Image: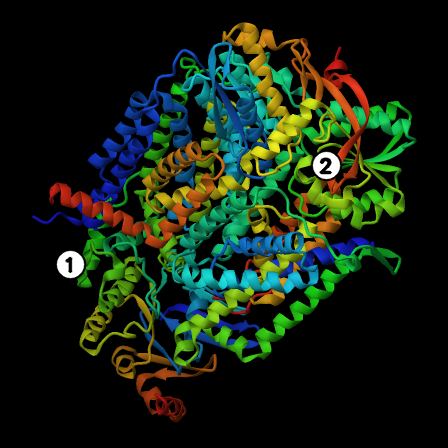
Amino acid sequence: MLTILFDGIAYGMLLFVLACGLSVTMGLMNFINLSHGVFSMAGGYITAFLINRLGVPFLLCLPLAFLFSAALGMVLERTLYRRLYARSHLDQVLFTIGIVFMAVAAVDYVIGSQQQTVKLPEILKGRIDIFGGSIGLYRVFIIALCGCLAVTIQMLLVKTRFGSQLRAAVDDPRVARGMGINVNTVFAITFAVGSGLAGLGGALGTDILGMDPTFPIKFMIYFLIVVTVGGTSGITGAFFASLILGIADVGGKYYVPQIGAFIIYALMLVVLIIRPQGLFSRSKGK
Amino acid sequence: MSNHTFSKRVWLAAPVLAGLGLLAPQLAQPASAQETVKIGMILPMTGPSSSTGRQQEAAAKLFIQQNGAKVAGKTIELIIKDDTGAPDVTKRLAQELIVNDKVSVLLGFGLTPLALSVAPLATQAKVPQIVTAAATAMITEQSPFIVRTSFTLPQASVPMAEWSLKNNIKKVVTLVTDYGPGLDAEKWFSETMTKGGGTVVENLRVPLRNPDFAPFLQRVKDASPDAVFVFVPSGFGAAFMKQFVERGFDKAGIKLIATGDVTDDDLLQEIGDAALGVVNTHHYSASHNSPENKVFVEAFRKANNNMRPNFMAVGAYDGMQLIYKALEKTKGNTDGEGLIAAMKGMSWTSVRGPVSIDPDTRDIVQNIYVRKVEKVGTELYNQEFSTIEAVKDPFKAAKK
Amino acid sequence: MSIALATHDLVKNFGGLRATDHVSLTIHTGARHALIGPNGAGKTTLINLLTGVLTPSQGNITLEGENITRLSQHARVQRGLVRTFQINQLFADMSPLQSLCLAVSERNQQGRDWWRVAGSDKAHVDEAEEILTRFGLRDVMMQQTRFLPYGKQRLLEIALAIACKPRVLLLDEPAAGVPEEERHEIIDILAALPKDVTVVLIEHDMDLVFSFADRISVMVNGALLTEGGVDEIARDPQVRAVYLGESGHE
Amino acid sequence: MAPSAHQMMLDQARWRWSESLFWLSSLAVLFVFPSKALLFSQIAIMGLFALSLDLILGYGGIVSLGHAAFFGVGAYAAGLMAKHGMGDPLLGLGVAAFVAAVIGWLTSFLLLRGSDLTRLMVTLGIALMLFELANRMAPITGGADGLQGMMVGPVLGLFSFDLFGKTAYLYALTVLFLLFLLARKIVHSTFGLSLRAVKGNALRAGAIGISVSGRLVAIYTLSAAFAGIAGALSAQTTQLVSLDVLDFHRSADVMLVLVIGGVGWLYGGIIGAIMFTLMQDWLAGITPQYWEFWIGLVLVCLVLVGHDRIKTGVQSMVARLGGKGGAA
């Protein structure tokens, strides 16, 4: 059924934008960051605020959400996260969970616990019929936008000087420093971009996934699934993992609603048992 | 190595000291004066159901503020605790409130399992347990000390089915959240529907933690019913409504009917125009036209940063009302059995309309209103247009 | 003379890369056999295949006549095939005494004993202590391994293998990284190994190889180039070419 | 005379005076603060749960974000027993331990390969699936409403559970203490030493003849049994079981508890449970709505300052107060 397929793809694309930043920090930088959802939440809330209070058009909110979350990510990375790179995974888990707790309670305190909503522009409402299926325009928009983003990010990572600097910095920070790469800056920028993307995902997802203070906790598990199933090779894995999970989740719930919630977990377990390193991993992983 | 061991040894003793430090202030509580009646209120203040906690806390405090902390010569003291939505915590807090704080009444309970966890304690300690939120029908059967001032889902769903049958809606799909109240709503709506000659084509259950309604809605659409009957817990309504409209159900001629949880007053403004025209049945709307309600809504908004009270707030407000009335009747005697006896059959004019406590089931008897979401000025409200008076919980009525 | 360890047509592929290329090697009981070759020749891969860290793509391995190709790592150790590592693989948080006691207990099939306190079997502790004394580690036996000087750690690396009572001992560059003045300790230890223990030595240090080995195999690009007695190899022009090539950029 | 190597090995497992002090004071608190018995029994159960996690994380090196699976299975096992007329608490504990151990044993094989992250997710996935399963099997488990109608008998047929939680605490503390002794025995045994070796360097452990996967399967199964008993204790002392016992937040909490107290020493979990639960109770008493913020802040500070530095701080403080006396 085409509609379901499209819904699944849209959902998967959304997951990808939300999680791809994490797959870089966690997969490449080997930093376990459970607080990734906080940046999505920041993006979602700033969008809701801009639209509902200041009347900023939705499409303009998207880049603003990206910038806001990126700035937030940059500041936190410089002041806090940076100190955690060299620490044990357990410390990282403890620290980032602490950040999540604080963010959840703080948002609850400042804004309240109700669901946030955004008003979509008229052109993104409604549906179109393609190939006998009926698809929401907003979902088409998400697919198109996220598809472009995925290609852009991949290009940035593979083709640009920054991409190669990042890979060098990840492979061996000491050698990279020796080659004159400013590893700190590279990591900071990467973290900021990842956070920004999460914020953008939050802004896009508010309408479909809902946005409330518990968002970072609710979606933490989904992010982790995307990253582990995708593997640590970079964003290609995360991309395909998101798509597969999105389609499997939506399709599963449509065709066999009785076992709907199992499918995504079962899929993850099967992948991890067959390929412990995820679908796409560098062939000679550490 | 020896250094290591030493530090561990100190580390062993540290928490004991720290623990004593933390506990000390709690022990220093003054012995409660005879004239004080303590009411323990347990609510989910954090986690996914925290909006329930917030509304109920605000309402209970407002009640005390409006009516004074003195009743029948006793001073009322309200102790609020957060159970985080975890039943074992609820139970422990209830136990501590009973044993340590010596509360006379327990109040609150945001979700069915939370209310159920305390039921045996209420029985054992003979402390009235007033359920102000949880809405699965069978809760009040779990202890003779449970009284409810919220509502039951059968109470809200059966009138919806009856209204549908009268308004030529014959073919329905139900879509409910997959937990106690949802299943209650599904069962009672479907039964009433089938009995009245309608058909329920499909019963869909959405997992409690479901990020995307899309696949379920698509299934509804494929079944092309006259209407889809929906129950989702308060808080999930907004996301659902958005997707409902986005999927073009209105154009496909599928109506949305629901219990009032979906068009929760607290969220209606956020849901926006998508909700316009949705017909639903419930026991309270912030726009309920009565002098009592006008005063209540205004005071509530003033005290809470313009937050609109919803049906949760009313449950707690009436819970406090019930306690006050019962204390007056017992002349300040806080014996549990006496209080329960006083509460049975109690009736008063609530902000939601006339209500009473069914002496047989200890469940609330109240009007159920059929409402339609409409715009009043700039704000959206559930406008009541039909009243079914004095509805008892059909679940218990059916057992007789 | 009986055969201690033999490989037959052993192949290991990593993706498209062939790290071990049809290696057939025979090592006699009691031999002092050296395996030499330039960096990247596949020596360590071969050791990993022999000890079960890696599974061969093709071919088989026999230990004293028994086919051990599919046996797990620990099963091979229990049969007397023991190795040391080129880069120290020690239990950093344990003391040398604990490490040695554990190795001895495991050899005596008591590693699953979950009731008695570790070290309650006095014979095992005494044996561990004896080995530590022999390796000059008695003084530091209660320190945490991670804080030992490198030379001591290198000795512990070998001591751990000895505690397993090997019948065939594979030494992967035992003297790697050890400063010149401490090398003699290791050389003495090697020289004192019992004669009935078969030793396979992988080494870059040609002085050590020529003073220790009685037979030498040369590996290049994953395959065996040649094999022979010490003098034979020393004169072999092919080997000289390989090594001169190598020493050129060292 | 320098002690012999044999003596030195045995010394490492010696019972220390501070340990007796610890356990005696844990008993004494009941009499000093009898009104807090319920909180204490919750701490004891959390401590046992964290201890079970420590067995695999601290001693086996397996990171798990799904340990609630076993806690939940144990709780449901004990709860179902009590519901169907077999309310003897000790029998319930036994069955819970057995069922949890079987599930632990079966799932342990999925954890033998892969990185920390993979294990984290596999354990998480298993717990989430069990959660869904319990939710689906509502006719048996009561689904989201929780299990109704448990009838737990008195402990040993003598001590019934009271409203004040005294029996509950003494029962939970006794079980915790006995299992702690067992765990202590195990980690100080040769088997325990071999676990440390496996965790420290699996490659070398294999090279001295240790069956790495065998040891991991064994400790994982044992840890599951411990967690199952913790779950059963929780079910019996609170006389309720709901889906919450399998919830993700329970796995996360126990991980936090353990890391706060210290991974890799048996008191870590227990001390973490004491600190975490008291702190949570205290903060939630002050600010029922926003206590999570302060817990978060404590976690963040704990990591930034470093737990080691806190330990050293306490140590130097005590050393200054008491001179060199206590240091051995």
Residue B172 on image: x %, y %: 85, 35
Quarter occupied by the C terminus of chain C: bottom left
Q: Which mark is residue C23?
A: none
Q: Is residue B193 above or below residue C47?
A: above
Residue B71 on image: x %, y %: 51, 13
Q: Which mark is residue C139?
A: 1
Q: Is residue B105 above or below residue C120?
A: above
Q: Secondary structure at mark 2?
A: loop
The residue type indicated by label 2 comes to Val
Horizontal side of residue C104 vs A184, given as left or right: left
Residue A245 on image: x %, y %: 67, 55
Read off the residue under disc 2: B262
Chain containing the residue with disc 2: B
- Please indicate, yes or no, whether residue A186 appears anywhere in the rendered image: yes
Q: Is residue D89 above or below residue A10?
A: above
Chain containing the residue with disc 1: C
